[in-house]
Amino acid sequence: MKHTLSVTVENEPGVLSRVAGLFSGRGFNIESLNVGPTLEPGVSRMTITTEGDEQIIEQIVKQLRKLVTVIKVRDLTELKAVSREMVLVKVNAEEGKRAEILRITDIFRCKVVDVSLDEMTIECTGDAGKLEAIIDLLTRFGIKELARTGATALKRAKQ
Amino acid sequence: MQLTGAQVLLKCLEKEAVKTVFGFPGGAVIDIYDELPNFSIEHILVRHEQGAIHAADGYARATGEVGVCLVTSGPGATNAVTGIATAYMDSIPVVIFTGQVPTPLIGNDAFQEVDIVGITRPCTKHNYLVKDVRDLARVVKQAFYLARSGRPGPVLVDLPKDVLQATCTFEYPRNVRMRSYNPNMRPHAGQTRKVARLLQEAERPLIYSGGGVLSARAHRELTWLARRLSIPVTSTLMGLGAFPGDDELWLGMLGMHGTYAANMAVNNCDLLLAIGARFDDRVTGKVNTFAPKATIVHVDIDPTSIQKNVAVHVPLVADCKSALSALKEELEPGLDVPAWQEKHETWVKQVRSWAEEHPLTYAPSENGRIKPQFVVEKIYEITKGEAIIATEVGQNQMWAAQFYRFRTPNSFLSSGGLGTMGYGFPAAMGAQKAFPEKLVINIAGDGSIQMCIQEMATVVCNNLPVKIVILNNGYLGMVRQWQELFYKKNYCQTCMDAQPDFVRLAEAYGAEGYRITETKDVEPVLREAFASDKPAIVDVRVEKEENVYPMVPAGASLTEMLLV
């Protein structure tokens, strides 16, 4: 099963390599990983999506906690959380195809961020399912390039 | 007052009460060596950096204190890596200082530059590159704290030359505060009660103890629990010495080369109390047939050890000493020792009968050649079990573990997890430095001893009278044993009969050399060598194709033992 882990770490040189090395050294998978600063100076948040059975995920969480530079690890999969990912898709958009591409963009509430005579770059944000769906729809126009950020996620507020 | 980085470092070592550093100088660390004579720290100059790190490790295992090693950048640092990994696998507290090229040159492929922090990331508990001299004291304080606290391990500090030359005011931090590192030492009260209840309910309990008991110095608590509750004890290689090897309840080591009694007990117990052990594959054999009838309790300070290899029923995350003390508190009030004895009488009898059925033994020699096991037995007899024994890796290590009955903690130095040939001799050297008055013996093989033999020069010039007993069979014996048993006797590249004359080699270094070729000479010659105040090599020509038994083939169940 796929899990999303939210990991806060000391923002110091080598911390990414410690985390990535842990995954490769112990044979765990990283599906996506992204890092960015948090509000607290010196602390970064990594959002890691990974896959494995319960025992493997338990090991991953514990091994991450064992790293001296890791402050907190939270498995968001079991918790109520919001998860978002962004994709930039550069798609063929010759005369005659643009209207339809724009319609899809509209339906998915995406943005066109770059356009030329025969290409468009579309920015889309959402959960993984939504991104899969729009990529799927755009495929038939011919996707030239694509860049995904990997998921970033936060636990929902208590209600 | 302004101090240089080199001075700050040495001040820190004094503050940490470091007495001995094992090291080897080089360009990047000359500044430290330049200051060394001005400080109270003794430096043992080794002949190879691997010797330095193993010696620091042996010093740490024998004393329970942090061992310290100092090497230069590049090859100095990479030569230490095997020893760092050795300490990491066995959770030994060591702090390694490596020189580094000046910070402006880092990343330029400078002379003797290597990214040692990158290289050792997976085999240290933590490591640091110090880029500013003002961080140095804090980093050293943290390094020692990390090395010895929680689950101990090696910590490396990389020191660029310009940082060692830069100056700052010195202030050694009193405390360490790290928001991201808080090892859980105290056991959960509810879980502790649960374990106590399980002990009360169990009919056939077994203690399986490991190196964690020794690093937590919990041998007294362990012995209390076993004796008062009348519970048989087995242990891993790393745990030898925590429970007296001459006790009625002692079953010997378990696992691949464990005793028949220990493995049968694991297979038949209804409660397995694992304390500071990690269910290594050499211990469990086939995992899904391990302790099939038992409720498994696992006490360990490292949460990652729990549920890693074997599914356990009751985990208890804590330092072994706190956990065992908490159990004692739980069980002691109104403890009825005879009642416990009675409750476990049948089980203890059963276990003893297994031990009598198949004790650790060996076939008498048919051709007059010396049996290696006999040599270890004699070493035990002569030293009355009071020596510090280091081993290399392979058959020599297993025979030492089987036939020397370790009675006291920190008396057995052996590379368990990594299985590093060449470990024993420099480790013995480190232990001898810590305990100049004690008899320190390295039980070696003729293959392993050649991996760090250069330290003969170090022991001779530092008056460290380590005794090396080579069980010389002219083979890489353990690999040969596997070839014999599982590879149709294809002894490919394991015959090493082209070897130096170890007696003359010892003498060339200025040590004493002895050779034993006949069984009757074993005892008198060993006695003579042990009585001398000089380092010595005793070359014992033993049976060439002797095997270590019992043996559980890799991946088989513990009950599938090959016996003598």
Image: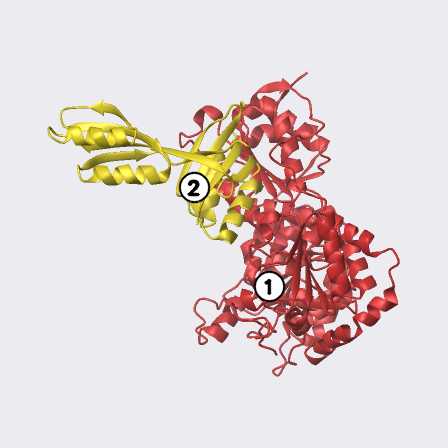
Up-down: is A21 above or below A85? below
List x then y, in percent, for residue B225: 79, 59
Q: Residue at x 57, y 20 (%)?
A: B166
List x then y, in percent, for residue A118: 14, 28
Q: Is residue B561 left or right of residue A32?
A: right
Name the kind of residue labelled 1 in the image.
Val
Query: Can you identify the residue that label 1 sits on?
Result: B283
Packing grade of label 1 (10 A; few <14, some 14-19, many >=20) is many
Query: Can you identify the residue that label 2 sits on?
Result: A49
Is residue A118 in view from this perspective?
Answer: yes
- State which quarter of the image contains the C terminus of chain B: bottom right
List x then y, in percent, for residue B395: 59, 66
Colour of chain A, in one word, is yellow
Question: Residue B399 sits in which quadrant?
Answer: bottom right
Q: Are marks 1 and 2 on the same chain?
A: no
Q: Is residue B46 left or right of residue B207?
A: left
Name the kind of residue labelled 2 in the image.
Thr
Shown in red, the chain is: B
List x then y, in percent, for residue B57: 64, 47
Question: Residue B235 sits in which quadrant?
Answer: bottom right
Q: Nearer the viewer, mark 1 or mark 2?
A: 2
Spatial distance from mark 1 to mark 2, Cα to Cα?
A: 34 Å
Do residues under tags 1 and 2 come within 8 Å of each other at their CB atoms?
A: no
Front in this rendered view, residue B241 or A64? A64
Q: Any mark on residue A85, and which? A: none
Front in this rendered view, residue B291 or B467? B291
Front in this rendered view, residue B367 or B59? B59
